[in-house]
Amino acid sequence: MALVISEVREQIGTITFNNFAKRNALSRVFIDEILTALDDLLAKKTRVIILRAPEGAKVWSAGHDIKELENPGRDPLNYDDPLENLIRAVQRCPAPVIAMIEGGVWGGACELVLVCDILIGTHTASFAITPARIGVPYNSSGILHFMNTCSMATIKEMFFTAQPIKAERAERLGILNHLVEPEDLETFTYNMAKQISLNSPLSISVIKEQLHILGNALPLSTETFERIQALRRLAWDSEDYVEGKKAFLEKRPPVFRGR
Ligand code: LCV
């Protein structure tokens, strides 16, 4: 069964996640299908791309497929991780990508929607970033994506509590561009997509890439980068990461010992 449904209407592409059994957990196979759909839509000169879960979804995406996380002792969010590839593909996509959100957005999926260009959701949308629930370190480019959206205090609360931010607060915090009624979600989203599709795609793609370049323009010395890697190794080498992954697979709360 296809894990994504892709369609085009008046130069507006829609990729619908269709992996409910795993709550749209972003596995390698699922991500490959999303990337193929993205390429196919761009080949068809689509001017706007919408990422969505099926109407009325309780879960937009459960985030990284925990079963596929690297084993403890290795970087679980390394540059070549499939989810990192998807995040970069969305950032580099010349067409604006709109995240149309109903339901919970978990873990790496929260970063995925933050790198989308516009977020439109209903009151069922929520946003949780969860490495602390699994005992993994997040990666620096990912943290920078949060820093480009929210205040440091909001980011610390999200990462430290690993608890969902509800839609109303997410709109106040600038995570959601628009919070709309469920019955208005499609019309509102497609009207905005239509407005964008009538503007200059070249101008939009250049401005999008300028924002991507300037948003990532945070100079780091090599020593600072190496210090960050050493810090991250403390977490991905920890017993806590072993426990976090094991607890998820055993469907029980983790017991972290801080080592
Ligand atoms: C694999 C899953 C998943 C899943 N992976 O349904 O950001 S970081 O650093 O943390 C990064 C590493 C990351 O993104 O980690 C993943 C973070 N995600 C989460 O912590 C969410 C974990 N999932 C849940 O809390 C629940 O599944 C939610 C609340 C999303 C949905 O709950 P619900 O009761 O509707 P189940 O939990 O029963 O899940 C249905 C099936 O989907 C699998 C889960 O193992 C189950 O599979 P089985 O039917 O084979 O048991 N599943 C859910 N999330 N992230 N698999």
Image (cartoon, grey):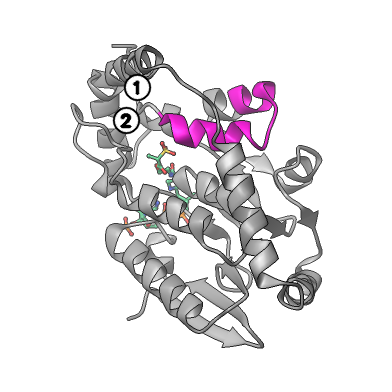
Q: Is there any visible trace of residue 38 in the rendered image? A: yes
Work out how far the residue at label 1 is from the one at label 2, CA to CA, in angstroms: 8 Å
Asked which quadrant contains residue 124, the reply is bottom right
Q: Mark 1 is on which residue type?
A: Val
Q: Nearer the viewer, residue 81 or 224?
A: 224
Q: Which is more foreground, mark 1 or mark 2?
A: 2
Q: Mark 2 is on which residue type?
A: Gly
Q: Residues within 10 Å of mark 1 (few under 14, many from 20)?
A: few
Q: Position of residue 33 (x, y in %)?
A: 35, 71
Residue under label 1, please give it. 255
> Is the CB–ligand 1 distance for label 1 below 8 Å?
no
Q: Position of residue 71 (x, y in %)?
A: 19, 36
Quadrant of image for the N terminus:
bottom left
Magenta stretch: helix, strand or loop mostly = helix
Residue under label 2, please give it. 244
Return the disc, 1 or 2, that comes first in the chain's sequence.
Answer: 2
Eyeballing the image, is 113 above or below 230?
below
Eyeballing the image, is 209 above or below 38?
above
Asked which quadrant contains residue 55, the reply is bottom right
| Left or right: 150, with 46 as reference point | right
Q: Position of residue 147 (x, y in %)?
A: 61, 31
User: What residue appears at the point 40 percent right and 31 percent down from the top-left corner?
Assistant: 139
Q: Secondary structure at mark 1?
A: loop
Q: Secondary structure at mark 2?
A: helix
How many marks the image carries: the answer is 2
Eyeballing the image, is 125 above or below 152?
below
Asked which quadrant contains residue 201, the reply is bottom right
Q: What residue span does the magenta drawing correspond to?
A: 138-157
Q: Is there any visible trace of residue 101 in the rendered image? A: no
Q: Nearer the viewer, residue 3 or 113?
A: 113
